[in-house]
Amino acid sequence: MKNTNRTFTMIKPDAMRNGHMGSILTHIEKAGFKILAMKLTKLSPNQAKEFYNIHKERPFFNDLIDYITSGPIVAAILEKENAVEEFRNLIGNTNPKEAQEGTIRKIYAKSIDANAIHGSDSDENAEIESNFHFSKDDIL
Ligand code: CMP
């Protein structure tokens, strides 16, 4: 599998509501990620169901859709060498209670449902998720 050096992120509704957008973007930039595309947006229920289609059989699916559509998000494409793995290290465990000190989820997230930020789990998914939110012309 090719390493694209790109990943996709969303700053999620809880972080936006709590006023952490700027701090999280600073954290990301200080870690050496370049922002290639970015937008403030809000997902409709249908968009959210499509985006999280891989989780549709999971017991938390309906709550996940309600939560991710509950307010604005920031979607972005990021670039850094080995971006997917580096970014997952930066954001920490899905469950903030298990996330390492200094990670974005440890600092800004309260629970596994409202965990402040998304990071793609593979290069393949980074491309799928980026294409969901952006067209080629959006990438600078
Ligand atoms: P993320 O990996 O960004 O996308 C799927 C989300 O589902 C995940 O973050 C969590 O916020 C949420 N979620 C809720 N419950 C669970 C769970 N038990 N396991 C994994 N993800 C969960």
Image (cartoon, rainbow, N blue to C red):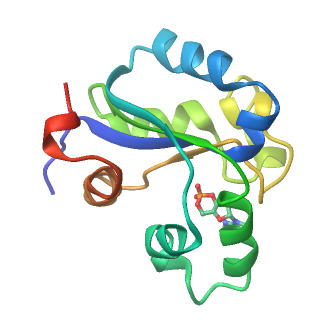
Depth order, front residue of 113/135: 135
Disc tally is 0
- Name the one closer to the observer, 11 or 73: 73
Where on the image, by quarter, is ligand 1? bottom right
Answer left or right for 4 relative to 112.
Answer: left
At x 65% / y 25%, what residue is drawn?
21
Residue closest to the far bottom: 57
| Quadrant of res 136 | top left
Q: Is residue 89 above or below residue 55?
A: above
Percent across and percent down for residue 117 are 62, 42
Image quadrant occupied by the N terminus:
bottom left
Displayed quadrant of residue 59: bottom right
Of all residues, the one furthest to the top in this rendering is 30
Looking at the picture, does residue 23 appear above or below residue 85? above
Residue 119 as seen in the image, left or right of residue 17: left
Residue 9 drawn at (x, y percent): 47, 41
Q: Residue at x 22, y 35 (%)?
A: 138
Q: Is residue 23 left or right of residue 45?
A: right
In front: 111, or 63?
A: 63
Question: Residue 25 location, x and y as percent?
Answer: 55, 20
| Residue 105 rendering spot, x and y as whole percentages | 71, 37
